[in-house]
Amino acid sequence: SAKVIDGKAVAKQIRDEITSEISRMRDAIGKVPGLAVILVGDRKDSATYVRNKKKACEAVGITSYEVRLPEDSTEQELLKYIAEFNANPSVHGILIQLPLPRHMDEENILNAVRIEKDVDGFHPLNIGRLAMRGREPLFVPCTPKGCIELLHRYGISIKGKRAVVIGRSNIVGMPAALLLQREDATISIIHSSTENREEITRQADIIISAAGQANMVRGSWIKPGAVIIDVGINPVDDPNSPRGYRLVGDVCYDEACKIASAITPVPGGVGPMTIAMLLSNTLSSAKRALNFE
Ligand code: NAD
């Protein structure tokens, strides 16, 4: 049965590496990385993500700055905080928690973040560079970067392989496909309008699924020996759980385990990697800004 790709363990290893790099930095130059997180509105899930990011920063020695704005804030008010953090030399990363309230223009806001501090990798210029051959983005979006990092750390080769990405969102599917292409895979992208999805996924040596559809990818969709990275986090009813629900991925785990050669569990796969990559992006930003190697 498939080897389990342990994202939780890899993420811990990465956080330990980051912790020791930051203490080396503190000892050498008396400075540590800083991350600013801006949350607009009171979505519960967003508040949880922000809290987790803050905790993760503290654990590795990154200073975190937090701003919470009310749902009915204007773009001008938000832009004012972004400008302050852009100018603050102690802040090396600026993260705008998405989604923004509907009355705000997301592209306009993301565009205002200094590209050198765009640790989420969502600035249009960073995304553009990700898509262009011969160019390097300053930062790569955290969730897709975490997927590729898992493949690397498990010694799974990507070059020349057939990869299928399920989903084409700006934050996961699209950048995941661009990254795989940069690693010399041959990619197909599947989305809600794709016909014969199953036939396409069955050709894949590597599947990255980010559709947000519980247990959609069945055993019959998978080529024997394929590697599966399951980004999906989907609640399903479970009367036996104290919360009344549990989380599952996009891939039917039990079926996939019998056919795939390696697979990420949900939870404990890609999830923990996302925050680890955010910390890693913030550290590299600080190193670049402070000229510290
Ligand atoms: P999204 O809703 O923005 O995008 C989903 C994409 O999947 C769309 O491009 C859509 O066309 C495609 N899709 C939807 N239904 C499909 C179907 N039946 N067949 C084929 N394609 C289909 O979602 P997102 O923000 O990209 O997130 C996707 C999933 O990943 C969610 O479950 C989310 O919770 C999870 N997620 C996890 C992490 C993490 O850290 N592990 C981070 C971000 C998102």
Image: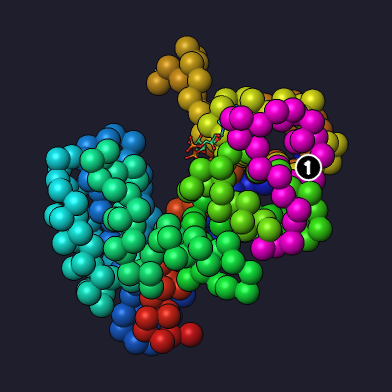
Relative to the observer, which residue lies in front, 134 or 179? 134
Q: Is residue 218 left or right of residue 202?
A: left
The image shows residue 9 at horizontal and vertical percentages of 58, 51
| Residue drawn at 37 percent across, 81 percent down | 289
Specify the quadrant of the image occupied by residue 220: top right
Are there few (<14), some (14-19), or many (20+) residues within 10 Å of tag 1? many
Relative to the observer, which residue lies in front, 267 or 232? 232
Can residue 55 be seen from the camera position used here?
no
| Residue drawn at 42 percent across, 80 percent down | 288
Q: Is residue 64 above or below residue 22?
A: above
Can residue 112 be seen from the camera position used here?
yes
User: Which quadrant is home to the N terminus?
Assistant: top right
Relative to the observer, which residue lies in front, 26 or 47? 47
The image shows residue 283 at horizontal and vertical percentages of 42, 71
Q: In this view, does 133 lie above or below 42?
A: below
The image shows residue 121 at horizontal and vertical percentages of 45, 60
Q: In this view, does 107 lie to the left or right of 254?
A: left
Residues drawn in magenta? 182-208
Is the CB of the residue bearing disc 1 within 8 angstroms of ligand 1?
no
Helix, strand or loop at label 1? It is: loop
| Residue drawn at 61 percent across, 30 percent down | 193
**Could you tell me how many numbered marks the image carries?**
1
Q: In this view, does 235 lie above or below 1?
A: above
| Residue drawn at 32 percent across, 49 percent down | 106
Q: Does the magenta stretch include residue 187?
A: yes
Residue underneath mark 1: 204
Q: Is residue 1 magenta?
A: no
- Going by the numbered disc 1, the residue's amino acid type is Ala
The image shows residue 49 at horizontal and vertical percentages of 35, 44
Q: Is residue 154 above or below residue 191?
A: below
